[in-house]
Image (cartoon, grey):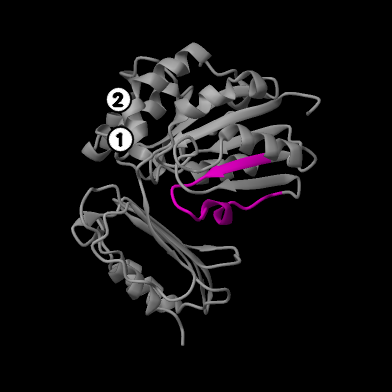
Amino acid sequence: MTQHKVLTNLITGFFGAGKTTFLQSLLEKQDPQEPWAVLLNDEGDLVIDSGILRPKADSLIIEEVPGGCICCSAGISISAAVEELIAIAKPKRLFIELSGLGHPSSVLVDLFSQKLSAMLHLSSVFCLVDLRYVLEDKIQSSQVFFEQIEVADVIVGSRADIASVQQLNAFNKWARGLPRKPNVLKTGLETIDLNLLETNTKNTLSDVKNIFDKYSQSRMHSSNLKPSHIVSAAVKDNQKNQSHYSSVRYPLNTLFDKNHLNNLFSLIKPPMLLGEARVDRIKGIFQTNNGWLLINGTIKEIIISKINPQKYSLLEVVSLDNLPKDWGTLERKIQNCIRK
C-alpha cells in the first residue's frame, strides 16, 4: 500500500480523437524525479499505443491491458490492473487511457470503490474529441461517445490548429449546448493548464452509477465485439468475417519496403472498406528498410509518420459495421510490402 493517494486522471475519447497524442504531451512535462504510471487499454489483442508513447524518464512505467474495453471484455478487472501497477511503479501520478470503445462509467464505478478510493485521488476526467467531425452521424449515433461526454470534466477538442473556421464554430456551438458545462480546451490553439490534472473530478459515485445504468445496453453490445484473428507468421485468410477487429503481429525482424508501404497507404482513400464494411480505425507500426513507420488512420484520414524503433511490426484494424468483412485482402497487400 502506498503512503499517499495517487493522483489519477482518466482519458477517454472515440477512435482517432487524439488520446495518445494528448497523453504524450502530458508525459513530456514529467519531472524525471517524480514517478508516473500509465495504464493503456486498447480495442484489440495488441496494444500499439505503448509503442507510440515516448517516455521522457526511467521513472515512467507503462502497462497494457489489451482485448477491448477493460470493463467488458479485456479479461482483467480495472481494480486488479490498477493495484498491480501501483505496487510495481509506486507512482505519484497515474493516467488511465481507455480504448475508443471504452465505457468510462464502468471504470469510474471501480475507481470509486472502497479499496481503490483509498489508494487513488481521482482528478479530472478528460474526453478527447476531434472537433472537425463532432457533428457527423458516425459520432452522434454512438452511445459510447455520449457516455464519454457525460463523465468528462474537461473536453479537449483536438486538431484545432488544422480545423476550418466553420468547424471551430460548429464545435464551439455544440460544446456550449452540453448540459454539464465541462471545461473546454482546443489543442493546437491553447496550452493545457497542468492545474487541471489536479482539479477534483465533479463526478460522484452516485453520478457514475446513474450513467452506468443509462448506457447498459451499449455496454452489452461492446462485450460482444469479437476478434477476427491474430497472426504471428504468414497472413491467414479469414474472408467475409463478421468479426469487428483484426490484429497482426509480424515475426521479429520482419522488414518492410518503405516505398511500397507509403504507396499502399497513400492510395487508400478514406472511407476505407473491407469488402462491404467500413474501417473505423487502422493503426500500424512497421520496421522498414529506412526506419520505422507509424500508420494512423481513421474514417477520415490516414497519417504516415516516423516512429522510434520498436520490437515488433504490428497492425490493428477495427470495423464496427455489422457487415461481411474482407480482412484478408488488406493483409495480403501489406504482406506484399515485405522485403524478400
- What mark, if any, has residue 45 been given in the picture? none
- Do labels 1 and 2 touch, CB within 8 Å? yes
Residue plotted at (47% across, 27% down): 106
Image-based side of 157 in relation to 136, left or right: right
Residue 30 seen in render: no
Image-based side of 320 in relation to 66, left or right: left
Residue plotted at (64% across, 18% down): 114
Tag 2 secondary structure: helix
Residue linked to disc 1:
134
Residue linked to disc 2:
174
Q: Dot 1, how many residues are within 10 Å of its Cα: few (below 14), some (14-19), or many (20+)?
A: some
Question: In the rendering, at what x and y percent does residue 103 appear?
Answer: 43, 32
Name the N-terminal-most of marks 1 and 2.
1
Above or below residue 289? Residue 321 is: above
Question: In the rendering, at what x and y percent does residue 129 appear?
Answer: 39, 36
Q: Is residue 260 magenta?
A: no
Above or below residue 153? Residue 45 is: below
Question: In the rendering, at what x and y percent does residue 208 appear?
Answer: 46, 18
Q: Dot 2, how many residues are within 10 Å of its Cα: few (below 14), some (14-19), or many (20+)?
A: few
Tell me which segment is drawn in magenta.
Answer: 37-56
Q: Amino acid at mark 2?
A: Trp
Q: Amino acid at mark 1?
A: Val
